[in-house]
Amino acid sequence: MTAREMTGIGVSPGAAAAPVARLAPPPAMPDDTGPEPDPDTALADAKAALETVAADLEDRAERAEGPAAEVLFALSMMPRDPALAGRVAKGLSDGRSTPHAIAEGFAFFRSALEAAGGYLAERAADLDDLRDRAIAALLGLPMPGLPDPDHRFVLVARDLAPADTAALDPAKVAAIVTEQGGPTSHTAILAKSMGLPAVVACPAAAALADGTEVLVDGRTGLVVPDPDSGRVRRVLDAESKRTAALAASRGPGRTADGHAVQLLVNLGSPADLAGAAAVDSEGVGLFRTEFLFLDRETAPTVDEQAESYGQVFAAFSGRKVVVRTLDAGADKPLAFVDHGEEPNPALGVRGIRLARTDAGASLLNDQLTAIAAAAAQHSAEVWVMAPMVATPGEAAAFADHCRAHGLPTAGTMIEVPAAALRASRVLDGCDFASLGTNDLGQYTLAADRMNGALADLLDPWQPALLDLVSLAAEAGREAEKPVGVCGEAASDPLLACVLVGIGVTSLSMAPSAVAAVRAELATKTLADCAAMAAEALNANDAAEARRLVAAFQ
Ligand code: PEP
Ligand code: MG
């Protein structure tokens, strides 16, 4: 890497090179000039400014489509929230000038979002953007907004509000780079849905000036200012090859030298069933069954469950379906189960631990009965696994329980470090293991997976997480039992190759990720994957692991 190269988190694949255009800065905040002489008029002016912002967003929503339109409509409701006007009125009666009363109103809601943490905290930037727009409208200044040069450009911003991302014209914007933001921010979600290459969390991008030519790789997170033409050509060529390979990608997962790796889909709701079944995959590697239990006052009956599982087995007739038993507790409490007071719910009675209680044991029993009944009616190859297993004893007890219900293939998720460390003994008592890298990452790095501020620690490229994957894969190899990955790590094509090099036997991911993973795998031999794995395992942190492995593209 040259000294000037920058790295962030690649959140939307694709590569592009174009001059930088930065997002227009927000209006400078005037000094607080104290109480307004006529608070009623001041409040009316503030409300008019908020309405201008809402109407502008609504207008843009009507011109947008799909997720962009939904995001803009949702945002247009915020400035019209009477609670916000109430806060502005309070600011005015406390003696603030109108711009400061507006800013205070937004600050109040911002701290509420930040206090909620996780996904909601990532929405805080939305409020800052709305505040800046409202103040610009109040002061009669141009709305802070997108640059509009007469050429294609790479949009660079400190953070990018959804209102701006949704309004981007993909014909003009070649790629997005933000200094802040996380992988679950609206910017990332929208950029992916619009097919725009995007890199977030790239603080060095603060130094990028308007007009600087920049090469952006939304897959690796690399941002290169003033790249030489040879490098641009190489990256763009590799990108067009990747797109072409993706379009041609078919059939079971294989490395270039024919090493088979099962490619499977993750399924979490009946709404996704048709789309997931249509994807060219070998089946479902993770069927999350929580959808049947959450948002209800009483437990679903055995018949109701059997009917639902049967629909999935029918859609995947002849293919494998790995059903994960209920993973309730922590952030997914059940209304009909008393979870008690838990100071640290993520470390509490969740997943298979729920079966320690009578109510939980009865839920598990009913669920296995329903899965077995549905499996008997259909020709899908049904496997069952338990979430949050920590000890070999739990793994064996669960497998015995499944077999007693006539479900012959029983496994465990490995998402607690203890289970990875003792994977051989865990596998002694069951038939297979599936690594839940989302939770395994959270518990290994001691970083709450709901906390966007810890995105770097939660990065699935963390070498410590890969070390535990390695232990589990080695145990699987020795026991000759399958050990796959079903966490988000499997959906990153390069990391998928690393996982294969480490020795996992299957990869289960969002249906939309399958083609890219299959295509990437097809360009690497098993020896390439092993070399990539060695580099990643040798790195000191996630960023270094990505960078070292990017050289294999
Ligand atoms: C995981 O933890 O990686 C996993 C696949 O399970 P979930 O995301 O449902 O917790
Ligand atoms: Mg999990």
Image (tube, rainbow, N blue to C red):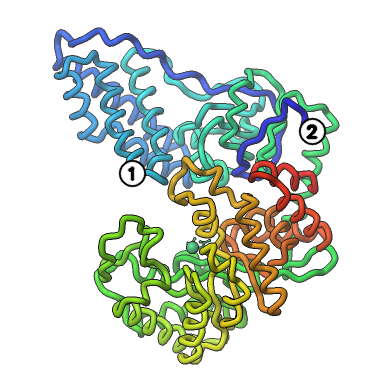
Q: Residue 116 got which mark?
A: 1
Q: Tell me: 97 left or right of 8.
A: left
Tell me the quarter of the image containing the N terminus. top right
Question: x%, y% of residue 162?
Answer: 46, 36
Q: Tell me: 263 left or right of 83.
A: right
130 w.r.t. 365: above or below = above
Question: x%, y% of residue 186?
Answer: 47, 41
Earlier in the chain: of badge 1 and badge 2, it is: 1
Name the residue that disc number 2 marks: 232
Quarter holding residue 120: top left
Q: Is residue 223 visible?
A: yes
Secondary structure state at the residue bearing disc 1: helix
325 w.r.t. 25: above or below = below
Q: Is residue 523 visible?
A: no
The reply to whether the C-beta atoms of the residues labelled 1 and 2 are less than 8 Å apart is no
Question: x%, y% of residue 417?
Answer: 54, 62
